Image: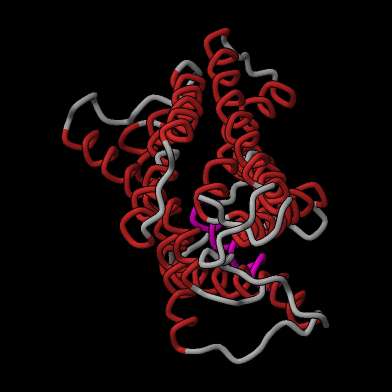
Amino acid sequence: MITATRAGAPLAAIALALAAGTLWGSLGLITRALLGYGLGAAQLALLRLGGAFAITLLAALALRRVRALSMRQWAWLAAIGAVCQALGSVSFSAAVDGAGSSLAIVLLCMGPLFTAAIDRLCFGERLDGAAWRLVLLALSGLALSVLCGRGEPAAAGLFAAPWYAGVAWGLLSGLCYGLFPIFARALGPLDTWVVVSFSLGLGAACLAPLSGAAPAAWPALSDVPAWLWIAALILIPTVFADVLYVRAIALGGPMLATVFALVEVPAAALYARWWLGAPIAPAQWFGIALFCSGLAGLAWRRGTAAAAPAAAADLPAVQPETPS
């Protein structure tokens, strides 16, 4: 399956997806720091999406990228905001509460399998046997690196009803992750900044009722470190990462972007090792090596495929930006 329209585009998409995943990997550490300032999880989610919406909207307006949208495009943007942004965030939190953080992350990383299944059913695209083996190798390494870490234990007992509910929420979060590139593709020609901005805004609107009637107090204006962490939350794993991810989908297609962005998980483990001194077990290092081997194999196959003519019927979801 070749999703780019010119040679070299798959490799550019791989680089963008890896960069997006690397930035997403910082989300846990930034959130952990802000929770220490007394901010609530729902408040942080709303702050993250709402602040990123404001910044990306200003960028889109400054670059003169905003234009009238069709009802169909509004519908797909609403789907991204409500399902991928809002429901994905809520379902992952529920999965952590019921099934524990390690299993929740593994279930979230099932996203590429959902993407591949939907791609096959809706667009008739398929991966060959070698590509499937490389994807499964990467996911196996990912699961090993997560499950062998010191994940937060489940609040509910193993195989109890709340545990099964947590697993269901985890699968739903994986589906939400896997649907993002599918929905972005269905948008048709639309500017990257517009896709990111409007989907974040609609996601923030969906999360607003969940923020609570009495949100946690904001840090004092004189608390510079807290506001620097808030700026990092909005910019690094949200504005920058989401823009890079949408461009990766545009250049390389849904499957490539969703797989390579999973570098977020080993990146988060390495950040925790460097910044917090969290140990990484030998089995985790082996899992990271397997994951990187799978991605390297996929990257090599994509680089080889880039030399072949692109399939005329397989166009990128988000077109290159129009000049200002």
Q: Is residue 52 above or below residue 8?
A: below
Q: Residue furthest front?
A: 309
- Expressed as whole percent of the image width and height from the top left, the position of residue 283 reads 52, 10
Residue interval drawn in magenta? 40-54
- Expressed as whole percent of the image width and height from the top left, the position of residue 228 reads 79, 51
Q: Main secondary structure of the magenta part?
A: helix
Q: Is residue 136 above or below residue 253?
A: above
Residue in view at x 66 percent, y 66 percent = 51
Write down the quadrant of residue 110 in the picture.
top left
Q: Is residue 81 left or right of residue 243?
A: left
Residue in view at x 48 percent, y 82 percent = 74
Quadrant placement of the C terminus? bottom right
- Expressed as whole percent of the image width and height from the top left, the position of residue 91 reads 37, 50
Q: Is residue 256 left or right of residue 322?
A: left
Report the front residue among 84 and 225. 84
Q: Residue furthest top?
A: 282
Q: Is residue 74 left or right of residue 14?
A: left
Q: Is residue 152 visible?
A: yes
Q: Is residue 96 above or below residue 45?
A: above
Write down the quadrant of residue 198 in the picture.
bottom right
Write down the quadrant of residue 14 in the picture.
top right
Q: Is residue 33 visible?
A: no
Q: Is residue 309 above or below residue 99?
A: below
Magenta includes 43?
yes
Residue in view at x 55 percent, y 27 percent = 294
